[in-house]
Image: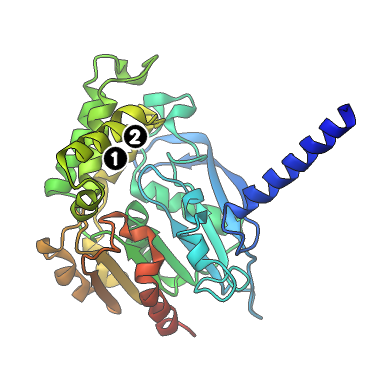
Amino acid sequence: MKALASNIMFRIAAVASVLSVSAWGATFPEPVEGDYVVKDFKFVTGESIPELKMHYITVGSPQKDASGVVRNAVLIMHGTGGSGRGFLSQTFGGELFGAGQLLDATKYYIILTDAIGHGKSSKPSDGLHLKFPKYTYEDMVRGQYRLVTEKLGVNHMRLVMGTSMGAMHTWMWGYMYPDVVDALMPLASAPVEIAGRNRMLRKMIMDSIRNDPEFHDGEYTGPLKNMVAAQFALFIMTSSPLQLLKQAPTREQADQAFERRFYQQTRQQDPNDMLYAYDCSRDYNPAPHLEQIVAPLYAINSADDQVNPPELGILEREIRRVKRGRYILIPTSDQTRGHGTHSLPKIWGNYLAELLKESAH
């Protein structure tokens, strides 16, 4: 009986192992995870940290030309509060990284980083709390650059793209490292200082955390009640009015959906990490540098994005300053998901195909 039980458990474990691989879509090569420790990393603020851990996931392998230049590297950067692992989902990686797909990982070298303060990279909740350096978007981009060049040995990027915060980082890659990028695709962003409603909503999140009576300058010992208020503000920022009405078309359904989302689902985000993640956008402003971007750039937003509402007219104005820039506004439809449209390549994949064709050498 013991042998039978052992055999059954082995088979269950084997099935679970197969399913865990299938969870990534099983349509692209097995992802490889790793860490790179940068010694004595200096931040924009003048602060430093003895060891900065940068976590990453790669799919595929780098390919060099005769002169030793990597020609197939694709960097994809996540949004605020996210991590590179999110791009392995069936709706993203399953649509892009498989055989014959736009970013076929048997041909491209996919790099998914966890930005500073996010995922498995160094962050305040590791122990330093509010003593962790006050990082900025520039620090995050420089950390990504050091990871891909120093650890992964990538000296050229076929494509740099990102969603939300990662899209803003994409604009910055365009002018900080113009000579190493072939193409750029920021998804759900604007190339200007964060101000107006966008900044106010971020301040709501930060002040909700800082003003919690149990925050104690980042040395809290239990859950913060004001984290719910922070989540309220984030929800208003990123939700889609059309989709919410479709999902909850009556008052009763809307109340039930609200209760499930905010009071019945466990939310694990650390308050210090969340505070830093929204504060680090404080110095973001590509506008003075747009003329320095030389690679083809396709900026894609959706009309139902409440973070980057098209009526502001920002991208129509600023894209003219990008030499090879193009602004694409996706109309609101049953398929769009507000700000979250950035993670649905089924909707914007045709534009990615155009960008890869235009930037091909």
Q: How is the image coloured?
A: rainbow
Give SS at disc 1. Answer: helix
Which label sits on residue 274?
Answer: 2
Question: Would residue 202 be visible to someone looking at this image?
Answer: no
Which residue sits at x=49%, y=37%?
Answer: 122
Toward which corner of the image does residue 107 lie, by quadrant? bottom right
Q: Is residue 73 left or right of residue 218?
A: right
Q: Which sits in the foreground, 127 or 15?
A: 15
Q: Are marks 1 and 2 in contact (CB under 8 Å)?
A: yes
Question: Disc 1 to disc 2, how far (Cα)?
Answer: 6 Å
Residue 323 location, x and y as percent?
27, 78
Give SS at disc 2. Answer: helix
Which residue sits at x=24%, y=61%?
Answer: 191
Q: Which sits in the foreground, 254 or 169?
A: 254
Q: Is residue 51 above or below residue 125?
A: below
User: Which amino acid type is marked by label 2?
Assistant: Met
Toward which corner of the image does residue 242 lie, by quadrant? bottom left
Residue 334 location, x and y as percent?
26, 63
User: Which amino acid type is marked by label 1?
Assistant: Tyr
Of all residues shown, which one is farthest toward the front? 1
Q: Report the quarter where the N terminus lies.
A: top right
Q: Is residue 222 above or below residue 286?
A: above
How many residues crowd mark 1 within 10 Å: few (<14), some (14–19), many (20+)? some
Q: Is residue 192 above or below residue 209?
A: below
Residue 243 location, x and y as percent?
24, 53
The residue labelled by disc 1 is 278
How many residues crowd mark 2 within 10 Å: few (<14), some (14–19), many (20+)? many
Which label sits on residue 62?
Answer: none
Which residue sits at x=71%, y=46%?
Answer: 15
